């Protein structure tokens, strides 16, 4: 009987470097309030958002991805040719096919990489990390580039009072590579399809074929429904990620949740009983909700500003449309 050789991977995987891209245009709450009946104070109180970044026409999802990835590769000390896979998490690459990842891999010179996109909304980056770890440990890639990128401004209805102030643009990237010690804990992930309609497009692309006067589909969200779900249902997921990693709340050096709403973060902090000494990402104040980009962007800033220690242990959790979620404990690069 013919024996097929099994791939041989690394014993463990870890994040080797991160990089981010924040668009040049700053959009204040005052500007948002020109098209909706709201105020700077209301937006800050309800979400924690003070401003957000919106991409200019030249700052495409591809341009932002390449820039963030270049910084991550440099930080990791890894050449593009060494990358075995490029995974891009996004919901705003507005081309059905081919994937954004194939073009980004080409632009970077990652000539040896397989490349594909994943659609896991705000859980996309953590989902990509889990896939990267499995590839490295399974032997199908030595180094994996995970990118979260969004141009949510393209799908933001400026006249929708429930969503116009929430979303921002940007890209965050991480290079994941082999390690002799654990650097990415077991993932706690899943999906709750009963909440399928909580976040989505106003109408599907195929509606344009029969109703060309519809215009362009925009994002819609049942805010209170999502708030309740995230505030309560994500706490057991975060606990599960810590338990699977064998890490207690006292041992964390940072908490980097998806930047959805400061009140969701506050509810999770209270329920998880995180010690006061654990720094918590609050990047939503300056970036808005950047979906798949929010966690790597926050990680990069916290490391650059010394808010989180290099080599420290961080709890990550992302959650969004689907509704989907993913969380893991990681060692920071």
Image (tube, rainbow, N blue to C red):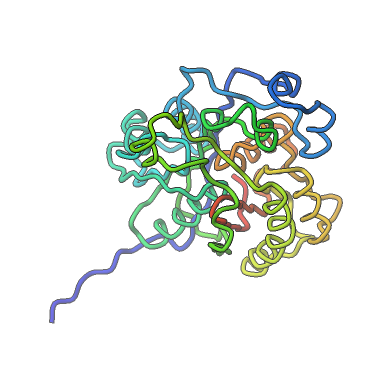
Quarter occupied by residue 225: bottom right
Quarter occupied by residue 36: top right
Q: Is residue 79 left or right of residue 283?
A: left
Q: Position of residue 269 (x, y in %)?
A: 80, 54
Measuring 41% from the left and 45% from the top, which residue is drawn there?
A: 87
Q: Is residue 162 left or right of residue 215?
A: right
Measuring 74% from the left and 61% from the top, which residue is drawn there?
A: 232
Of residues 165 and 218, the one drawn nearer to the viewer in this rendering: 218
Of residues 250 and 204, the one drawn nearer to the viewer in this rendering: 204
Q: Position of residue 71 (x, y in %)?
A: 51, 30
In this rendering, is residue 286 above or below 266?
above
Q: Residue at the far left: name it.
A: 1
Q: Position of residue 7 (x, y in %)?
A: 30, 64
In this rendering, is residue 8 above or below 86?
below
Q: Is residue 84 visible?
A: yes
Measuring 37% from the left and 61% from the top, which residue is drawn there?
A: 9
């Amino acid at each position: 009987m013919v024996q097929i050789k099994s791939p041989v991977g690394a014993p463990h995987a870890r994040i080797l470097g991160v990089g981010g891209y924040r668009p040049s245009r700053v959009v204040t709450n005052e500007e948002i309030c020109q098209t909706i009946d709201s105020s700077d104070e209301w937006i800050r109180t309800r979400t924690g958002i003070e401003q957000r970044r919106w991409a200019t026409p030249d700052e495409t999802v591809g341009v932002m991805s390449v820039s963030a990835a270049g910084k991550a590769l440099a930080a990791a000390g890894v050449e593009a040719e060494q990358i075995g896979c490029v995974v891009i998490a996004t919901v705003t690459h507005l081309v059905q096919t081919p994937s954004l990842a194939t073009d980004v891999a080409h632009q970077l010179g990652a000539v040896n990489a397989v490349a594909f996109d994943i659609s896991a909304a705000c859980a996309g980056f953590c989902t990509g990390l889990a896939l990267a770890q499995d590839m490295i440990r399974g032997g199908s890639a030595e180094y994996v580039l995970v990118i979260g990128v969004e141009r949510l401004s393209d799908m933001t209805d400026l006249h929708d009072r429930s969503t116009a102030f929430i979303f921002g643009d940007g890209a965050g990237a991480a290079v994941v590579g082999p390690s002799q010690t654990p650097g990415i804990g077991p993932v706690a992930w899943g999906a709750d399809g009963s909440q399928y309609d909580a976040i989505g497009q106003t109408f599907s692309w195929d509606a344009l074929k029969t109703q060309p006067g519809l215009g362009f589909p925009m994002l819609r969200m049942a805010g209170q429904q999502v708030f309740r779900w995230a505030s309560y249902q994500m706490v057991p997921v975060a606990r599960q990620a810590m338990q699977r990693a064998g890490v207690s709340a006292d041992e964390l050096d940072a908490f980097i949740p998806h930047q959805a709403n400061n009140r969701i973060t506050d509810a999770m902090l209270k329920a998880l009983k995180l010690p006061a000494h654990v720094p918590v990402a609050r990047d939503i104040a300056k970036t808005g909700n950047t979906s798949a980009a929010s966690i790597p962007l926050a990680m990069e800033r916290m490391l650059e500003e010394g808010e989180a220690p290099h080599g420290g242990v961080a709890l990550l959790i992302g959650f969004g449309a689907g509704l989907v979620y993913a969380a893991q404990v990681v060692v920071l690069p």
